[in-house]
Image (tube, helix red, strand yellow):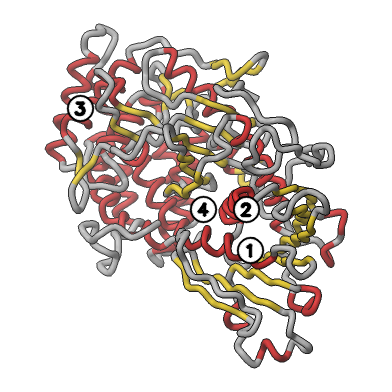
């Protein structure tokens, strides 16, 4: 692990406990072998598939911190089964957990002892708090609508042994016991995770260990809006400082799609946090503002990073570019692209990362997302094998120009959601960089077009041209820089990127149930039309005209207020 800036807590300390509290815990469990992100539930909840964590909570503060950790773990469909003797503290933990999930410390949380269940409709979904103590037959719950209320909800169930038939496969069993002769508020807990929550519990423990080690054990944890990936982010808040937790579990390869390789391998997508760490250090060493790394668990995919705050590079409703900040962003690219950049980056002692080349196979499989996802989204006919072969041939020809140029670091998602404004710094260091773990060695024009044809906000064509002129003006100081070659690559990669994003946003809707991204499609289509107007792409434009339909008129207008993603 990367050394933290603050002394670590004693090994085995309970969540958020002060350093002088005796942990009284068993030895640390060995780190399990890496599992798929969504493992199949174990048959019958077999003990061999369950993760176990024994915890001692010395006071109510530690109980609230455990509830905070649990709130970050749980998702609709999960169940927490709370067992223990009368007075052990089941309702105390349940009440703290309800308030954490609700994000309201003052929320009234009555005991469901007499009502059998309390239902909360919260911003993160429905939560059901049930007490089975007075249940004699499961049918009693059905009479008050248990199945309907508990479906796709987070369920907290006290006295679960009285209704074993209602226990779901994705379940966290928590047994709470008093600790004699240790004070009235001390509790010993055994947490056992089943199904999805087996992996989740192991991960929750790793996160708590990292947070404590970095000196953020007492911090409040808050969800941060993430991106379209499987990564999750939190802001950790103490009285005098903040940090960002990146939770990026290893992304397992999908099924083979070509030549026995999965999509992620062909497209050179990061499968762990190693590229992020290497790239962050590489950027900082060259004077760019990448987040400082406070602590890391590379095996678990957990990073604790410098917090760049809330100030971005856009403003207004709908949001648009802030001229000074976009000019700084284009200046940063020009300066970066004038450097001789290595293809190998140090990550840690005896650990390096070799940046892959943004090669023809990667560019082609990305652009084919248009055929695989956008065309079905629009109800267009599937291209015949000859038509698909012609599509690939036209793209192979178009991509030769950018592939022949001297490669630079390509961050791939160099656009407004990943650019933060740091007004207290100077020059290009005022631009904070995020989300560069998919770095490749490729044509410099790719990140330029990522900025000037932003997928999520409208960049007026006049602004795009002004930024291009500014970039070209700075790069022309190098006699080896060819303006015509750069502009040709810019048009080709603009069309490639727009085609890819049309496919990705259609896939997010159809496969991942995220329809909010569809509102961006008309904008992406306009960028695509701009790029395909380049004379050298006339044949490719003719193929698109014949086979790729424009967005439907019913697609939400991009000027509409943003939808939560």
42 or 519, nearer to the observer: 42
Quadrant for the N terminus in the image: top right
Answer yes or no: is residue 259 visible.
no
Callout 3 secondary element:
helix
The image shows residue 462 at horizontal and vertical percentages of 12, 37
**Residue 327's mark?**
3
- Residues at marks 4 and 3 touching, judged by CB atoms closer than 8 Å: no
Please determine whether, in this image, residue 42 is positioned above or below residue 458.
below
User: Taking 398 as reference, is 14 left or right?
Assistant: right
Callout 4 secondary element:
helix
Callout 1 secondary element:
helix
Q: Residue at x 45, y 53 (%)?
A: 371
235 or 18, nearer to the observer: 18
Residue under label 2, please give it. 60
Judged by depth in the image, the label closer to the viewer, 4 or 3, is 3
User: Taking 550 as reference, is 233 left or right?
Assistant: right
**Residue 92's mark?**
1
């Amino acid at each position: 692990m990367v050394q933290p800036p603050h002394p670590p807590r004693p090994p085995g300390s309970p969540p958020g406990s002060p350093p002088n509290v005796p942990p009284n815990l068993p030895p640390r469990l060995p780190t399990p072998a890496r599992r798929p992100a969504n493992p199949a539930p174990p048959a019958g909840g077999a003990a061999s598939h369950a993760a176990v964590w024994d915890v001692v909570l010395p006071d109510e503060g530690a109980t609230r911190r455990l509830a905070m950790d649990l709130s970050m773990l749980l998702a609709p469909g999960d169940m927490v089964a709370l067992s223990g003797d009368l007075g052990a503290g089941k309702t105390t933990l349940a009440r703290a957990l309800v308030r954490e999930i609700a994000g309201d410390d003052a929320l009234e949380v009555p005991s469901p002892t007499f009502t059998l269940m309390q239902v909360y409709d919260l911003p993160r979904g429905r939560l059901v708090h049930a007490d089975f103590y007075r249940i004699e037959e499961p049918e009693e719950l059905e009479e008050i609508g248990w199945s309907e209320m508990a479906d796709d909800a987070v369920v907290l169930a006290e006295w679960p042994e009285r209704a074993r038939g209602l226990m779901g496969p994705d379940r966290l069993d928590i047994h709470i016991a008093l600790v004699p002769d240790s004070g009235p508020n001390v509790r010993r807990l055994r947490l056992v995770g089943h199904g999805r929550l087996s992996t989740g519990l192991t991960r929750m423990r790793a996160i708590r260990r990292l947070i404590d080690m970095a000196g953020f054990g007492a911090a409040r944890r808050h969800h941060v809006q993430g991106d379209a990936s499987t990564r999750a982010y939190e802001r950790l808040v103490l009285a005098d400082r903040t940090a960002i937790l990146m939770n990026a579990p290893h992304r397992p390869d999908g099924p083979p799609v070509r030549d026995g390789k999965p999509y992620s391998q062909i497209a050179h997508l990061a499968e762990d946090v190693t590229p992020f760490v290497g790239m962050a250090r590489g950027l900082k060493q060259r004077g760019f503002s990448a987040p400082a790394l406070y602590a890391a668990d590379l095996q678990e995919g957990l990073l604790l990073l410098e917090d760049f705050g809330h100030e971005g590079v856009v403003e207004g409703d709908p949001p648009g570019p802030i001229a000074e900040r976009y000019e700084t962003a284009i200046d940063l690219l020009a300066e970066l692209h004038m450097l001789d950049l290595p293809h190998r980056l140090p990550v840690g002692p005896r650990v390096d990362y070799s940046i892959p080349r943004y090669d023809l196979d990667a560019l082609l499989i990305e652009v084919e997302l248009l055929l695989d996802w956008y065309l079905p989204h629009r109800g267009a006919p599937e291209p015949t094998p000859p038509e698909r072969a012609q599509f690939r041939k036209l793209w192979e020809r178009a991509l030769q120009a950018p592939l022949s140029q001297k490669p630079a670091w390509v961050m791939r998602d160099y656009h407004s959601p990943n650019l933060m404004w740091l007004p207290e710094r100077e020059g290009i260091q005022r631009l904070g960089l995020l989300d560069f773990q998919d770095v490749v060695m490729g044509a410099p024009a790719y990140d330029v077009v990522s900025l000037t044809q932003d997928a999520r906000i409208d960049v007026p064509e006049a602004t795009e041209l002004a930024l291009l002129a500014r970039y070209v003006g700075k790069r022309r100081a190098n006699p080896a820089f060819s303006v015509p070659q750069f502009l040709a690559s810019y048009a080709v990669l603009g069309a490639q990127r727009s085609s890819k994003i049309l496919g990705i946003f259609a896939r997010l809707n159809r496969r991942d149930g995220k329809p909010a991204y569809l509102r961006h499609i008309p904008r992406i289509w306009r960028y695509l039309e701009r790029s395909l107007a380049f004379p050298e792409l006339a044949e490719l434009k003719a193929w698109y005209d014949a086979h790729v339909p424009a967005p439907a008129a019913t697609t939400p207008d991009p000027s509409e207020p943003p939808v939560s993603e």
